[in-house]
Image (cartoon, rainbow, N blue to C red):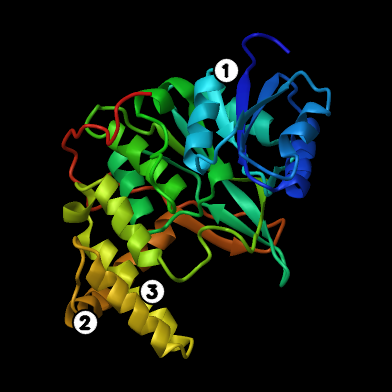
Amino acid sequence: MSDRPAISIVTPTRNRRETLARALASVCVQTVGDYEHIVVDDASTDGSADFCDRLGDSRVRVHRFEVRQGANEARNRGLAMARAPIVTFLDSDDEFLPHRLEHTLAILAAEPHTDLVLGSFRVQRARGNAAAVNRDARLDGPELESLLMWHALYLGGTSITVRRSVAIACGGYAATLGRMQDREFLLNLATCHRGNGTGGWARISDTVDWTKHESEDSISRPVAGYVTALGDLMSVHPDLLPRHRLAVQYHVARHLKDQFRAGRPWIAGRVFAENRRVPAFRFTLPTLLAAYRQGRVIRRRMLRIGMAGTEPIGLRPSDVIPMPRAIDASRDRRPPARQAM
């Protein structure tokens, strides 16, 4: 392995030795071999670090936390350790398709102004597989921010490839955030690029280049805590709520509506109580009802812009809707949420 590989892969893991082996195997079959794979073991007790050491592959570098630090601290340690100018992420329960590195590196080589590539993926679940395909687009900071706030992009941690210097300058991941970690990281990158005159720095790709395996222990799955997590995200970025209040209210209202629709009114009651406990929210029922009616119209438009749809494996979007040059976002310059790493 060279001292400066073309790309660094960062995998945070904790007690996922079996799926980690699958993730590592997916890297070994890449069509590009000039990489380093940094595995940050968050105090696992299942021998994950020892397993990586026994592989005997000099491209695999392992760092082990003796005390649990959390996934975002693990990602930040990987960013700090990375020797390549480009960093991509691979969650330990996901896997790359063989062309992932080649495809991503080709985009960044052809587009030197691009700092971020966000890919599409296929989802493997018990009830059948599908492809979560985003529309091919080049976005600036306000555009990316709006699509993220309206949840109008298919998103996963393994989707993200970024120039290391940009990730470091923007402060990496928010160490204290327990959920919505990848969304927050991208929102912070968008904040860093607000008003700096760099258009099209974020590249959304419609190429499916990784597989997401649904995990029962995923931190994004539980219903409980969603509204609190949304409030935590707003506390990290307090400037977002004034700009995207309707989107936030819509998400709370939709979460509430989904529980009623599923025949779980008692859970809906907990969701509403959760909303009332978040100091920045405390939305009333009339406010949420009005936000849902207005917000679903806007979100449908945003989905047509950001997502090509969940297609059967093998299909690609037949049309690409150009990204509007402005989507409900002012372009004033704002400081990043965190200092540089």
The amino acid on which the numbered mark 3 sits, given as a three-letter code, is: His
Could you tell whether 272 is left or right of 241 in the image?
Answer: right
The amino acid on which the numbered mark 2 sits, given as a three-letter code, is: Leu
Residue 297 shows up from this direction:
no
Quadrant where the N terminus lies? top right
Q: Secondary structure at mark 1?
A: loop
Q: CA distance from mark 1 to mark 2?
A: 50 Å
Quadrant where the C terminus lies? top left
Q: Which residue is mark 3?
A: 255
Q: Position of residue 132 (x, y in %)?
A: 59, 57
Q: CA distance from mark 1 to mark 3?
A: 41 Å
Q: Which residue is mark 2?
A: 285
Q: Which residue is mark 1?
A: 84
The amino acid on which the numbered mark 1 sits, given as a three-letter code, is: Ala
Number of other residues with Cα within 10 Å of mark 3, as a class: few under 14, some 14 to 19, many 20 or more: some
Q: Position of residue 260 (x, y in %)?
A: 41, 87
